[in-house]
Image: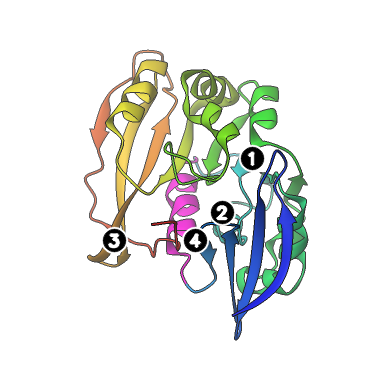
Amino acid sequence: MRLVDTAPIPGGGELRLFAEGDHYSIKIAGGGDLMSTRMHGSEDALATIACERIPRGRQARVLIGGLGMGFTLAAALAHLGQDARVIVAELVPGVVAWNRGSLGRHAGFPLDDARVEVRECDVAMVIRSERSGLDAILLDVDNGPDGLTRIGNDWLYAMPGLAASMAALRPGGVLAIWSAHPDRRFVARLRQVGFAVDEVPVRAHGSKGARHLIWLASKPSNPAGTAIRRARSGPIDARPRHRRG
């Protein structure tokens, strides 16, 4: 495995891009793999499941928090119409540069799509600036509510951040969050804010492999809808990223 490049994380820490043959992985300095081009099914599923909930025919506006290796963005673009607009908020400029280089070919260079706007900033800034303007917010900026990469991400999963996401969504819009582990307290916070929540299990290979979750938190079309329900569909074939632990 060969170290290709490093990128500082604003506020502290460092990301490292490694190459092994034709594949790449991103690690956090002092930790394990964050993601790999070998396994990206969970990134694909995050976008696919959320974008399927956007009504057809709507000029969709979607916010993706965390560019990663571009797989979530590529999957979202595949499901959205040509008049859609996708904002990608990526805190680490180096990650954007890596995706514009040879790493980008694994996801098909989605940053080159005319529907995409990249903002090199904290996704929280974009969420705060929106008022009922987004159809979906896809968060893949950490390990889930129990984040490991950056302490600043805690705001996204706390009551103030969830309330800001609620305010940023259009009625019927969805907040989609990837997580490595279940978290009943987090689900309770989502419910307290007013979201209706589906917990969608994802596994590595069909019905096998590690179990993870994608939470789909929907803003009610009317203020009365706040039920939490378990997704009834079977597990989605989604390979989880390489994560710490």
Placement of 213 over or under 240, stated as above or below: above
Kindly report which numbered mark, 4 or 3, lies closer to the viewer in this rendering. 4
Q: Position of residue 155 (x, y in %)?
A: 55, 26
Q: Secondary structure at mark 1?
A: loop
Q: Secondary structure at mark 4?
A: loop
Instruction: List the residue tagged with mark 2.
Output: 76
Quadrant in which the N terminus appears: bottom right
- Amino acid at pointer 3: Ala
Is mark 2 in CB contact (under 8 Å) with mark 3?
no
- Amino acid at pointer 2: Ala
Direction from residue 92 to residue 163 in the image, left or right? left
Placement of 66 over or under 100, stated as above or below: above
Quadrant in which the C terminus appears: bottom left
Q: Earlier in the sequence, mark 2 or mark 3?
A: 2
Kindly report which numbered mark, 4 or 1, lies closer to the viewer in this rendering. 4
The numbered dot on residue 182 is none
Q: Earlier in the sequence, mark 2 or mark 1?
A: 1
Instruction: List the residue tagged with mark 1.
Output: 59
- Amino acid at pointer 1: Gln
Q: Earlier in the sequence, mark 3 or mark 1?
A: 1
Instruction: List the residue tagged with mark 3.
Output: 210
Residue situated in front as seen by the camera: 27 or 40: 27
Residue 49 counted in the magenta span: yes
Would you say the magenta stretch is mainly helix, strand or loop?
A: helix
Kindly report which numbered mark, 2 or 4, lies closer to the viewer in this rendering. 4
> How far is mark 4 from mark 1, CA to CA?
39 Å
